[in-house]
Amino acid sequence: MSGELPGTKIDHLGIAVKSIAQARAFYEALGLRVTHEETVEHERVKTAMLPVGESRVELLEPTEEDSPVGKFLAKRGEGMHHVALQVEDITAAMERLKALGARFISDEVKVGAGGHLYFFVHPSSAGGVLVEIVQPAAESTHG
Amino acid sequence: MSGELPGTKIDHLGIAVKSIAQARAFYEALGLRVTHEETVEHERVKTAMLPVGESRVELLEPTEEDSPVGKFLAKRGEGMHHVALQVEDITAAMERLKALGARFISDEVKVGAGGHLYFFVHPSSAGGVLVEIVQPAAESTHG
């Protein structure tokens, strides 16, 4: 486990709320602004992104009660749903966590809508926190 | 509520764990390093700080079961205890939140051990998340 994985930072905090319209006012009072809103159909969730420093807050509002975030709200109420950490080398991150015996939500790296890579670590391996590991989409490098 | 509050960023994520010795391995596998450990006697909690980008992860391990973090663990299990947002003007932040009708853990700004200022917003006013608002200690300015 020795050696650094450079560039790790908090990518975003995913916060499950009943109503984005209500929850955003708190963050707006602190000077944050919603820069992007989106409905992710296959997750049945509405999202609002509020950049904060090098990270962002993502408010998550379910569009249906039996969606993943809807079930989370029913069970635990509003609150932190997941923490996303951005790394530069997601394959190296997964290998290190596998070597540690960490438990994953799925055992492979997935490709997100914007081309970013991600996987989720089970809360039992991360101090009770659902952790998403993210690697940004590669920028095109013409040379 | 218009106007920006510049400089807001995530200061730290406070994560309640049963054992820092066990929980740190996950973050160390991602390249984070414990740079500071401390026992805060009056809170009856051991803390380990792991910088990540402009923020840090703070692992919180209770030294007694009936301490605030010990009670949190007994009730909710391991997981996110609080999110700290750093602002440049904590008085302005509190005024804006008061104007919004936000509920606070205590209605005044407090001074921390290192000279930083802080207050806590009740989770019911912040999407179910216990939010700490922090202003760093003023640096000495000699003219």
Image (tube, coloured by chain):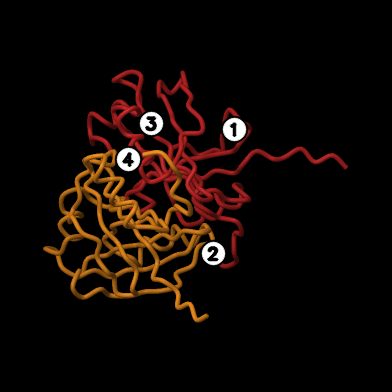
Chain colours: A orange, B red
Mark positioned earlier in the residue sequence (4 or 2): 2
Identify the residue shown where x is 59% and y is 64%: B4
Q: SS at mark 1?
A: strand
Instruction: Tell which residue pokes out farthest to the right in this image.
Output: B143
* Cβ atoms at labels 4 and 2 below 8 Å apart: no
* Cβ atoms at labels 3 and 2 below 8 Å apart: no
**Disc 2 chain ID:** B
Rendered view: B60 above or below A130:
above
> Which one is in front, B139 or A7?
A7
- Pointer 1: residues within 10 angstroms few (<14), some, or many (20+)? some
Of badges 4 and 3, the one in the foreground is 4
Label 3 and label 1: CA atoms lie apart by 20 Å
Q: SS at mark 3?
A: strand
- Number of the label disc, if any, that sits on residue B1: 2
Determine if marks 4 and 1 fall on one subunit: yes
Amino acid at the residue labelled 4: Phe
Q: Percent x, y for residue B108?
A: 54, 38
Which quarter of the image is occupied by the N terminus of chain A?
top left
Amino acid at the residue labelled 2: Met
- Pointer 2: residues within 10 angstroms few (<14), some, or many (20+)? few
Residue linked to disc 1: B111
**Disc 4 chain ID:** B
Identify the residue shown where x is 43% and y is 23%: B43
**Disc 3 chain ID:** B
Amino acid at the residue labelled 3: Leu
Label 4 and label 2: CA atoms lie apart by 40 Å
Mark positioned earlier in the residue sequence (3 or 2): 2
Residue linked to disc 4: B26
Rendered view: B104 above or below B96:
above
- Number of the label disc, if any, that sits on residue B60: 3
